[in-house]
Image: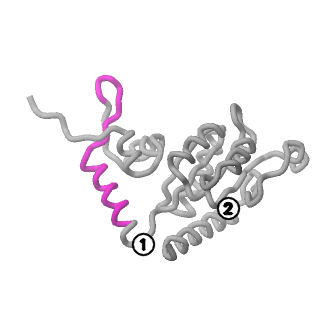
Amino acid sequence: MSAAPRSYSTQKVAERLGVSIQTVQRWVDAGHLRAWKTLGGHRRIDADSAEQLFKAKTSARGASGAEALRVLVVDDNADDREILAHLVTQAVPDAQLTLADNGFGGLVSIGQWQPHVLITDLVMPHMDGLEMLRHLTRITGVAPRHIVAVTSHSADELARRGPLPAGVALVTKPIARQAFIDWLQEAQRQEAARALSA
């Protein structure tokens, strides 16, 4: 009987690369990682395939002197999350990206992952983006340095919900693609400069 091929769990690959489990699953679906499912329905990532990505991440960090930009997208609408994720990868192809579908999940990801950039919808179930941002202002040293709130609501509707915390940029849907990409690339430049001066 032959030995089982070397492999990693999806969770282990996500942890090693600093991305969400959903991102690893998308990479498998897109053919960037080789994988299979066990009889129990669990996905296993081919070890050689995963280790090539681990090495690429280490090499990229060593070459640039700074780690990849970490970006968290929080939006309850799956289509909008995918659009925002696509814009992030267009603007910063080597960004590490993770996703959440409400403010509570966003806060958990921020605490665990400490992203450089937060992109959040404002109106969501359970805990909306505005409430999440207000929580962040009360927690010292945790909030990402670059935050943009996106919404399809009018200025009057937003005014009834109360002001955004200081330093949070506001972008209305549908998003102006180039302006959004420029904002992300500027955030990347600022983080790279910060890393070089550290």
In the image as oriented, which residue stretches furthest toward the left? 1
The residue at the point 71 percent across, 32 percent down is 125
Whole-percent x and y of residue 126? 69, 31
Element carrying mark 1: helix
Q: Which residue is mark 2?
A: 180
User: As rendered, which of 170 and 140 lies closer to the eye?
Assistant: 140
User: As rendered, which of 103 and 24 lies closer to the eye?
Assistant: 103
User: As rendered, which of 58 and 173 lies closer to the eye?
Assistant: 58
User: Is 89 located above or below residue 26 in the figure?
Assistant: below
The residue at the point 72 percent across, 39 percent down is 128
**Type of amino acid at the residue the image marks with label 1:** Ser
- Over which residues does the magenta segment extend? 38-60
From the viewer's perspective, tell me whether residue 139 is left or right of residue 156. Answer: left
The residue at the point 53 percent across, 63 percent down is 92
Element carrying mark 2: helix
Q: Which residue is mark 1?
A: 64
Of tags 2 and 1, the one toward the viewer is 1
Image quadrant in which you'd find residue 130: top right
Image quadrant in which you'd find residue 14: top left
**Type of amino acid at the residue the image marks with label 2:** Phe
User: Is 156 located above or below residue 167 in the figure?
Assistant: above
